[in-house]
Image (spheres, rainbow, N blue to C red):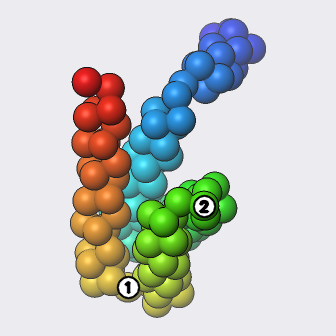
C-alpha cells in the first residue's frame, strides 16, 4: 500500500475540514477511546487501558486549550473540561470502571449536543 499517498490524502482532508467538522472528529475520537479504555479495563489489558485513557485526557486538554475565552460559553466549557479531567484521572489512577461508567455518558451527551448545533448551523 502506498502510505505516502494515504498520508497526503489524510493531510488534505484535515486541511479542508471546517472547525465544526474538526471538533466532531475530536469528540468522536474521544468517545472511541473511552469505549476502548472501558473494554480494556474489563479485559484487564492495562497497557491498552493506560494508552486509551491518556489519549482521552490529551484530547480534553487540547479542547480546553483551544477555547476562546472572550465568549461566555467558553468559561462554562472550561469548568466542564476540568471536571472531565478530574474524573478521567480518577479512572486512570484507580482503574475505576464505575467512574468511567459515570463520566462516559456525560461526554457522549456533550458530543451529541455539539453535533446537533453543527447540524442546525448547516441547515
Question: Measuring 50% from the left and 84% from the top, which residue is drawn there?
Answer: 86
Q: Residues within 10 Å of mark 2 (few under 14, many from 20)?
A: few
Q: Which mark is residue 30?
A: none
Asked if 46 appears above or below 69 in the picture, the reply is: below
In front: 94, or 112? 112
Q: Say if residue 81 shows up in the picture.
A: no
**Position of residue 38 measured from the top left corner of the image (x, y, whole percent):** 35, 67
Q: Earlier in the sequence, mark 1 or mark 2?
A: 2
- The residue singled out by tag 2 in the image is 70
In front: 77, or 97? 77
**Left or right, 60 with reference to 11:** left
Asked if 50 appears above or below 108 in the picture, the reply is: below
In front: 34, or 114? 114
- The residue singled out by tag 1 in the image is 96
**Position of residue 101 measured from the top left corner of the image (x, y, whole percent):** 26, 75
Q: Residues within 10 Å of mark 1 (few under 14, many from 20)?
A: some
Question: Measuring 32% from the left and 59% from the top, which residue is drawn there?
Answer: 110
Question: Measuring 39% from the left and 61% from the top, which residue is drawn there?
Answer: 34
Q: Say if residue 50 shows up in the picture.
A: yes
Amino acid at each position: 500500500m502506498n502510505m505516502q499517498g494515504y498520508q497526503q490524502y489524510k493531510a488534505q482532508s484535515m486541511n479542508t475540514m471546517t472547525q465544526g467538522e474538526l471538533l466532531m472528529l475530536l469528540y468522536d475520537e474521544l468517545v472511541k477511546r473511552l469505549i476502548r479504555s472501558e473494554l480494556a479495563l474489563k479485559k484487564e489489558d492495562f497497557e491498552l487501558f493506560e494508552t486509551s485513557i491518556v489519549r482521552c485526557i490529551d484530547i480534553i486538554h487540547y479542547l480546553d486549550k483551544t477555547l476562546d475565552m472572550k465568549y461566555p460559553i467558553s468559561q462554562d466549557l472550561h469548568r466542564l473540561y476540568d471536571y472531565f479531567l478530574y474524573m478521567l484521572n480518577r479512572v486512570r489512577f484507580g482503574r475505576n470502571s464505575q467512574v468511567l461508567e459515570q463520566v462516559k455518558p456525560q461526554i457522549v451527551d456533550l458530543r451529541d449536543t455539539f453535533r446537533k448545533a453543527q447540524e442546525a448551523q448547516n441547515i
